[in-house]
Image (tube, rainbow, N blue to C red):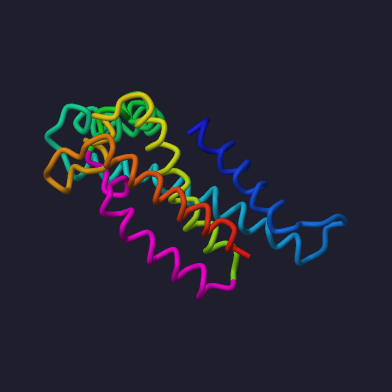
Amino acid sequence: MSSHLPMAIWYSLVVFLVNGITWPLTIQTLSWVWFLVGVVVGVMILFLDRVVYVYSYPNEQLSQTVMHHYGQKDYKSALAVLDLRRLEQNRLTFRSALFIAVWVPLSFFALTSTTGLFGKGVVMGLMLHILYDSWKLQKLDSSRLNERLFWQIGRVVRPEEQLVLMYAVSGIFILFSFWVA
C-alpha cells in the first residue's frame, strides 16, 4: 500500500498539469481535488480484492490464517498477513485480463457520461493500480504475470502476447488520462 498511494498522488498531479491547472487556484480548479480523491479510492479499492480472495478460496492456508486472525478480532494482523503474503494470491478477480477487457468500455462510459471528477478518478485509479502491479510483475517474472492476468483464460500466454496486451492497455490508459477533462 505504501507504494500505491504516492503513485496515485503523482499520477493525479500529472493529470492536473496536463489539463492546465493554473494559479491562483479557483473553485473550478479546486474541484480537481475530487479527481485526486477518486484516484486514491480507485487504487485502494483493489486491496479489497485480497479480502474477497480469502472468502473465495477458504481451504487455502493463507485464507485460514487470515480468518483465524479475523475470528480473534485481530484485524491488524489479518491485514498484515494479507499484505505480507500477497504474492500467494494469484486468482484475483479484478487483476485479470477479463477485468481489463471490461474496464475499457466501463471507463469510456464513465469518462463520457460522468461530469464529476470523483467518478472519473475512481475508474482511472483502478487501472492505474492494475497497470502498476502488472508492469512490475512483468519485469520481475513474466510467468507469474501469466498466472495473475490470464488464469481465467486457461492457456499459457507467451511473454510477447503479454506485452501486446500491456502496451495496448497502457496506451488506452494514457489516452483516457488526457481525456479526463
Place residue 180 in its image quadrant: bottom right
Q: Residue at x 32, y 61 (%)?
A: 102
- The answer to whether 105 is drawn above or below residue 70 in the figure is below
In the figure, is residue 169 to the left or right of 6? left
* Relative depth, front residue between 119 and 178: 178
Residue 167, position in %: x, y?
40, 45
Quadrant the C terminus occupies: bottom right
Q: Magenta stretch containing residue 128, yes or no?
A: no
Q: Is residue 76 left or right of residue 98?
A: right
In the image, residue 173 sits, relative to residue 79, either above or below, namely: below
Residue 99 is one of the magenta-drawn residues: yes
Seen in the image, is 39 located left or right of residue 19?
Answer: left
In this view, the residue farthest toward the right is 24
In the rendered picture of this protein, how many numbered marks are placed on residues? 0
Is 17 drawn above or below residue 146 in the view shown?
A: below
Give the overall secondary structure of the magenta segment. helix
Residue 80 in picture, x, y percent from top left: 38, 27
Q: Residue at coordinates 33% horizontally, 53% vertically from top-left?
A: 100
Residue 115 point in image, percent of width and height: 59, 73
Task: Pick whichever, 164 or 155, lies toward us.
Answer: 164
Left or right of 83: which side holds 89? left
What segment carries the magenta color?
91-115
**Residue furthest toward the bottom?**
113
Residue 107, horizontal then vertical, whole percent: 44, 63
**Which of 30 and 139 lies nearest the eye of the viewer?**
139
Q: What residue is shown at x 32% (from left), y 45% (from top)?
A: 95
Q: Observer-nearest residue: 140 or 5?
A: 140
